[in-house]
Image (cartoon, rainbow, N blue to C red):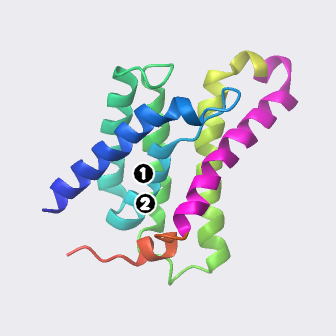
């Protein structure tokens, strides 16, 4: 039953990303709902499940034309899943600011890698504009994470015990 739930929720999140991303894009800066989903999956199910799911979702995303470069989305989602999997079940063992700083750093790293490949020429020519785009794209996704915190906090996802 758990596998079916994961597949159905993954499909819903992917379709939400596919359909609504154009409406939420502001000056070529758009949120990434797949990364939010992978972050929660890593906190709930651990590293292995999240890496496999991140790679599959990223590959499907690239094949359906959601992203620009083939292989970039599976790479960045898998890196994020690997790093976020460290936090699996560790909310009680880590200080809260360490826990939240770690997933924030992971999210910012994801967007740095993604934006570096998408805006290489901007990184070479104007680093300030590159870092502004990187910060804005990361912050735009963070807004949706903070909204989601009211419904299902990350600390609760980290405490989830799957039977």
Q: Main secondary structure of the magenta part?
A: helix
Residue 36, image x, y percentages = 49, 52
Q: Which residue is at the front of the view, 42 or 2? A: 2
Residue 41, image x, y percentages = 37, 58
Outermost residue to the front: 23
Q: Which residues are magenta?
A: 123-149
- Dots 1, 2 in contact, CB < 8 A: yes
Tell me if residue 21 comes above or below residue 84 in the rendering: above
Task: Indicate the quadrant where residue 136 lies.
Answer: top right
Q: Is residue 74 visible?
A: no
Q: Quadrant of the N terminus?
A: bottom left
User: Disc 2 on helix, strand or loop?
Assistant: helix
User: Disc 1 on helix, strand or loop?
Assistant: helix
Looking at the image, which residue is at 35% across and 62% down? Answer: 46
Task: Indicate the quadrant where residue 75 lies.
Answer: top left
Residue 142, image x, y percentages = 63, 53
Q: Which residue is at the front of the view, 54 or 32? A: 32
Q: Which residue is mark 2?
A: 40
Q: Label 1 vs label 2: CA separation? A: 5 Å
Looking at the image, which residue is at 62% across and 68% down? Answer: 100
Q: Is residue 140 magenta?
A: yes
Side (left or right) of 80 relative to 16? right
Side (left or right) of 94 relative to 115? left
Q: Is residue 26 magenta?
A: no
Looking at the image, which residue is at 54% across and 71% down? Answer: 150
Residue 74, image x, y percentages = 41, 34
Q: Which residue is mark 1?
A: 38
């Amino acid at each position: 039953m758990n596998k079916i739930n994961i597949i159905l929720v993954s499909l819903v999140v992917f379709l939400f990303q596919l359909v609504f991303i154009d409406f939420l894009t502001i000056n070529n800066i758009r949120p990434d709902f797949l990364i939010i989903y992978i972050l929660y999956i890593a906190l709930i199910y651990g590293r292995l499940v999240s890496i496999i799911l991140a790679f599959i979702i990223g590959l499907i995303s690239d094949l359906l034309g959601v992203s620009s470069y083939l292989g970039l989305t599976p790479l960045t989602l898998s890196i994020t899943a690997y790093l976020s999997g460290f936090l699996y079940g560790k909310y009680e063992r880590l200080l809260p600011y360490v826990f939240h700083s770690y997933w924030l750093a992971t999210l910012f790293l994801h967007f740095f890698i993604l934006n570096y490949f998408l805006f290489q020429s901007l990184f070479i020519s104007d680093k300030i504009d590159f870092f502004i785009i990187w910060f804005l794209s990361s912050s735009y996704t963070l807004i949706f994470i903070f909204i989601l915190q009211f419904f299902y906090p990350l600390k609760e996802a980290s405490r989830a015990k799957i039977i």
